[in-house]
Amino acid sequence: MASATAVLSPHADVILPRMKLPLPDFTVPLPPFEVPEGQQRLIQFREALREAMSEEMRRDKRIFLLGEEVAQYNGAYKISQGMLDEFGPKRIIDSPISENGFAGLAVGAAMYGLKPIIEFMSWSFSLVAADQILNNVPKMLYMSGGQWGCPVVFRGNDGAGGQLGSTHSWCVEGLYSNVPGVKIVIPSNPYDAKGLLIAAIECDDPVIFLEPKRQYHAEKAELDESVEPGPLWQSRVVRRGQDVTVLAYGPTVKVALKAAEAAAGEGRSLEVIDLRTLSPLDMGPVLESVRRTGRAVVVHEAHVNLGLGAELAARITESCFYCLEAPVLRVGGFDTPYPPARIEEDFLPDLDRLLDAVDRTFDF
């Protein structure tokens, strides 16, 4: 092992002390969350999604939106508000309450050369269409020997619904990440919501686009179209640090950033990485960070049991074992269905639970 970050040769008789590497000089800046004054435009998460779909539909006549209440009602969460007036009923299409039916229609349309965007009112309801999403869409390119693919974007809200109960609030990323052939994206902010959805629509592969439900109507955030959102399948370091690497995605990125602010007051420096894409996982920034910090905590809203945190912990351990000062810890939802009403707040990962995990990485 000749790498500068390696601390143990497989043929060595002694273990060398782990080297504290300085923060690298990143000469290529990543897309910022704060844009220069005078260039920013405030926008809600749901507005960013609408703009992404509208811009792509103006560009490509093959694209259409199909789902329950997306047309006449402007979308259950008003994502598609005004799109029926602009694009008409042949491209903004209300479907029956039959996820299996309209997901199957999307498969045929994509194979025929169209570019469907399918909206699930909740990703919990997507399980009704499991045969289409898991058994047909991801295998089409493979089974046809590369002759035709299935470029569908399945999008809709994922996770905690604000007291909507268990049947409307399931985080499905762990389930779908186990399926080869589909790509999975989950943005954490309006800036990425627009940029990543545009990239997903333009992608020739099927994409599962998960949208944190609670952020639809959250406070507006800055958006600057002059800044490229970066490649679709790329994680992003959103805060530099040296002591602990915190990995998050979707709604827990905000929790991780708050934890980093709180930890800084206690003299600890947390590096926060927004994964952005869950399949494929971009492990480059993750491994580089953990080799420097020696500690890692994964935080996600989904159940901890057999979740994305377990996969990340395994990959980090395989690649950074001799650099780790502590086991990779996970913070997430408890191993129960989503609770009803206000108990939901106790189910979700919060600042205290994340900071407790950070503290525990120093106890080993």
Image: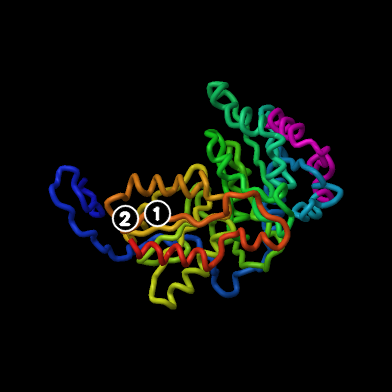
Q: Which residue is mark 1?
A: 328
Q: Are marks 1 and 2 in contact (CB under 8 Å)?
A: yes
Most extreme residue toward the left, as rendered? 13
* Helix, strand or loop for disc 2: loop
Residue 29 in the magenta stretch? The answer is no
Give the spatial CA distance, label 1 vs label 2: 8 Å
Q: Nearer the viewer, residue 95 or 204?
A: 95
* Helix, strand or loop for disc 1: loop
The quadrant of the image that shows the C terminus is: bottom left
The quadrant of the image that shows the N terminus is: top left
Image coordinates of residue 289 in percent, x first then y, are 37, 58
The residue shown at (69%, 44%) is 124
Q: Nearer the viewer, residue 43 or 217?
A: 217
Q: Nearer the viewer, residue 317 or 229?
A: 317
Q: Amino acid at mark 1?
A: Val
The residue shown at (66%, 28%) is 111
Q: Amino acid at mark 2?
A: Leu
* Residue 306 can be seen in this image: yes
Occupied quadrant, residue 115? top right
The residue shown at (64%, 52%) is 159
Residue 93 in the magenta stretch? The answer is yes
Q: Which residue is mark 2?
A: 324
- Side (left or right) of 349 relative to 310: right
Vertical side of 277 occupied by 268: above or below:
below
- Side (left or right) of 268 relative to 106: left
Image coordinates of residue 81 in percent, x first then y, are 79, 55
Q: Which residues are magenta?
A: 84-110
Most extreme residue toward the right, as rendered? 72
Most extreme residue toward the top, as rendered? 144
- Side (left or right) of 140 relative to 76: left
